[in-house]
Image (spheres, helix red, strand yellow):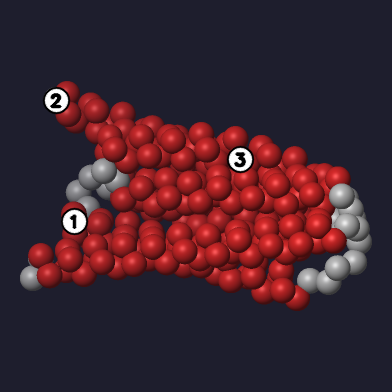
Amino acid sequence: MKRKTEEKDNKKSGFKTLLLSVLLSSPGPLILGLGLTVGRSSTQISDFTRRSAELLAIIASFVVYCMTSKDENMDPVKKRNIELSSNIFVGIIMCISGISMIVLALVSNNEDKGNVIPALLIAISGVIANTLFWRKYTSLYKESGNVILKAQGKLYGAKSIVDTCITLSLFMVAFFPGKKVSQYFDVIGSILVSIYMIKSGVQTVRESFGRKKAEKFTNI
């Protein structure tokens, strides 16, 4: 009885955390999109692309979590496959986001970047929020063992590190406009963010595929 109560509480906590992730992540792409009307930093454009892709992945994970948690009679093997497929999707989104950022960073020009303060403020708030979510998802995974929460923990761990890099890059662009050092930081910041996102995405996909294969052979 106690175990069932704990599982129910964990499901509720996971649902609330994922819902909060969706709600807090939704305004980011919109605000950054509006910010692009006054700023043209390659890091800023990259951040807009990244946040849009990540929002899609978070929404997908939220929907799958609701499906698998609500139906208690779902076949365990089917449930696991759905959850791992969701994680693979999250990993693919991270890779696509990283590749897009590299392309944008390499093709961007060195003209005046405009006002990047809105993007800088979002990046700073992102460092704080994503670090808190990273810790929360890690804690929830340890308690429940849910693979969707584990993938979200990895995603938010990557997001917190990425936002730190973006904050430093946009700080240089904002306070040293037109300087060579800010241009280098802008492009290098985008590339470093891209590499980290791709690496994290590949790891997530490989781990999820590995689990799917292992469970497939186990159930033969």
Q: For residue 2, which quarter of the picture? A: top left
What residue sits 14% from the left and 25% below the top? 1
Q: Which mark is in front, 2 or 3?
A: 3
Q: For residue 102, which quarter of the picture? A: bottom right
Kindly tell me whether residue 10 is visible in this rendering: yes
Q: Distance between the residues labelled 1 and 2?
A: 22 Å
Q: Find disc 3 in the rendering and name its residue.
A: 127
Q: Position of residue 196 (x, y in %)?
A: 53, 60
* Figure disc tally: 3
Q: Which mark is in front, 3 or 1?
A: 3
| Mark 1, other Cα within 10 Å: few <14 / some 14–19 / many ≥20 | few
Q: How far apart are marks 3 and 1 (CA)?
A: 38 Å
What residue sits 46% from the left and 40% below the top? 134
Q: Do the residues labelled 3 and 1 touch (CB within 8 Å)?
A: no
Q: Is mark 1 on a helix, strand or loop?
A: loop
Mark 3 or mark 1: whose residue is earlier in sequence: 1
| Mark 2, other Cα within 10 Å: few <14 / some 14–19 / many ≥20 | few
Q: Given the image, on which type of amino acid does mark 3 rest?
A: Val
Mark 2 or mark 3: whose residue is earlier in sequence: 2
Q: Find disc 1 in the rendering and name its residue.
A: 75
Q: Position of residue 220 (x, y in %)?
A: 8, 70
Q: Is mark 2 on a helix, strand or loop?
A: loop
Q: Given the image, on which type of amino acid does mark 2 rest?
A: Met
